[in-house]
Image: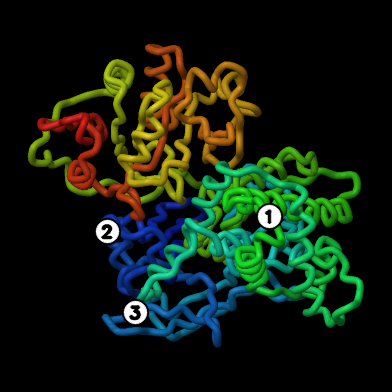
Amino acid sequence: MLICGIKASHDGGVAVIDGNRLVFSIEAEKIGNAFRYSPLTGLEQVTQLLTGQGVDPADVDQFVVDGYWTDDAAVVRTRRSGAPFTLPVAPYLDAPDGDPLRRYTFGDHDFAGPATGYASYHHTANHLIGAYCSSPFAARGEDGLVLIWDGGMTLRLYQVDRRLSTVRMLGTLLPMIGSAFSDFCAAFDPFRYTPQAPDPEAVVRHSLSIAGKAMAYAALGSVHEDAFGVIDGLLAERFAAALGLRRGQQTPSFQRLAGKMAALSMRIPDSAREVGEQVAAERDTLLPGLSNADLIATFQEYLGRLLLHRLTEVVRRHYPNGHPPLAMAGGCALNIKWNRAIRDSGLFSEVWVPPFPNDSGAAIGTASCEMVSRGGHWALDWNVYSGPDLVGGGAVPAGWSARPCDEREVAAILHQEGDPIVVLSGRAEIGPRALGNRSILAPAVDPLMKDRLNEAKDRAYYRPVAPICLASRASEVFDPGGDDRYMLFEHRLRNGWDKRIPAIVHLDGTARLQTIEPTDSSTGRILEAYEQLSGVPVLCNTSANLNGRGFFPDVRTAAEWGRTRHIWSDGTLYTNLQWDRDAS
């Protein structure tokens, strides 16, 4: 069965599954240097992407569209034949007592060929099934839990039973939606956004970008646990009012209210935003002396502890003597601090986060829903390098030379010259992280390298640069180290290594580690050769892209950007003939 999954709104994309094998997943932002979080340009782009990947749209057995919402209906506002078009889809959320995998069918649009109409599943379902089906325990045929916290939904926990082939919701854990952290941060500089004439798409891009940047910015501050009570009280006031508690009544803590409201499926979408705005307006009274970075760091830690507290309560209720495996999905599963805390809790035998936990994986998840529902497959056969291939045919950009070059020579250049190199190889990574095929690699031993890379990429000085490390030595260099292929858990440097590889140490002493095997990709082989030359099993790894855009789609774009002397792409080294290091 050939299935085409579609995410038409922000983080748009198209994914194809053949049986249970992921053929490809192409996100709109990775086409032609598009803006991050781009939607599909229109419904015709679906067939264009299929054709471009060698798939005849007429061969597709089923088109499936991710669920969504607007203020008044479950629809996606997109374009068809150049004109605005409203595409009906499944509701954003499943009902607490409903079927999480309920299948909806529509005849409002035919994408191509004999497959008339399209199916659709809840947005929650794409995260739920995409995370579970990509997990190691799904591949082993085991049951598992799935925790989902995405921008517009409350924190939800599901159980997958493989013997019965069923999915059920165990409960809503928090009444706050997944955008709570970014909503709070939006009240403070540098994340406040007040354009004179707001562009709706620019507002969406800004909102979606806050959480990742704020996680980095928090390292400029400190966690003030004595502020937790103030934050808890401000949240409790808003939720107590929703429960009908009168002014003057003793207001329970928000931690106590949260479970009660979640059980009633209640939520107040703007609660964190309102609290942020109140703190910003009354900070000298409420939380005197705290900087913006302190407030953001403190709120992040408060939310993380609240998340873990509620998760612990519910899991222990259902598994008093067990330790089930857990998959995590939704945009909040990109928070490496929260992920580390959950993994370290001891609640679970295994914690899995796919490399596409946010809506970058929605097309994959939506296609996987159909794979499970109609194909009967519960485990997805997939590869992280299933994005778009390079375009351009290897033409040599003007002002650049080109010559054959293997991975060992790239490693030697990195070691001897000490400068960054753009690496473009094979198919792009799926998901938001650059994992070696669309990366800028650089020596981590240079203490100035982080600043050089941030300046080259037009990024704020506080943004971290990730380490990529040989898996065989990760536990020697990092704590805890181990297998972390997709940069999704927080690590710290072990004794002495923070001095040896200072460029990848964040301001708070942490690192967003990616581990890699030499057999994984060209970057793995480059790193293996670099370690043999230098004794250091780590390089800097940051995404190869224009600021605010998707990955470089070709060598030409990287050359026009021109902020590295060398570009290496699938066996060819391109060198800038007019290179001026001081001007780069």
Q: Is residue 266 left or right of residue 551?
A: right
Give the foreground label among 1 and 3: 1
| Mark 2 to mark 1 CA distance (whole Å) | 57 Å
Label 1 Cα neighbours within 10 Å, binned few <14 / some 14-19 / many ≥20 = few
**Mark 2 / mark 3, whichever is N-terminal:** 2
What type is the residue that disc 3 sits on? Arg
Task: Tell me which amino acid carries mark 1.
Answer: Pro
Where residue 78 sits in the image (x, y, percent)?
38, 78
In the rendered image of this protein, does residue 419 appear above or below residue 201?
Answer: above
Q: Residues within 10 Å of mark 3 (few under 14, many from 20)?
A: some
Q: To which residue does mark 2 refer?
A: 52
How many residues crowd around disc 2 within 10 Å: few (fewer than 14), some, or many (20 or more)? few
Pick whichever of labels 1 and 3 is earlier in the sequence: 3
Which residue does the numbered mark 3 point to in the structure image? Answer: 79
Q: Secondary structure at mark 2?
A: helix
Counting residues from the start of the chain, the first of labels 2 and 1 encountered is 2
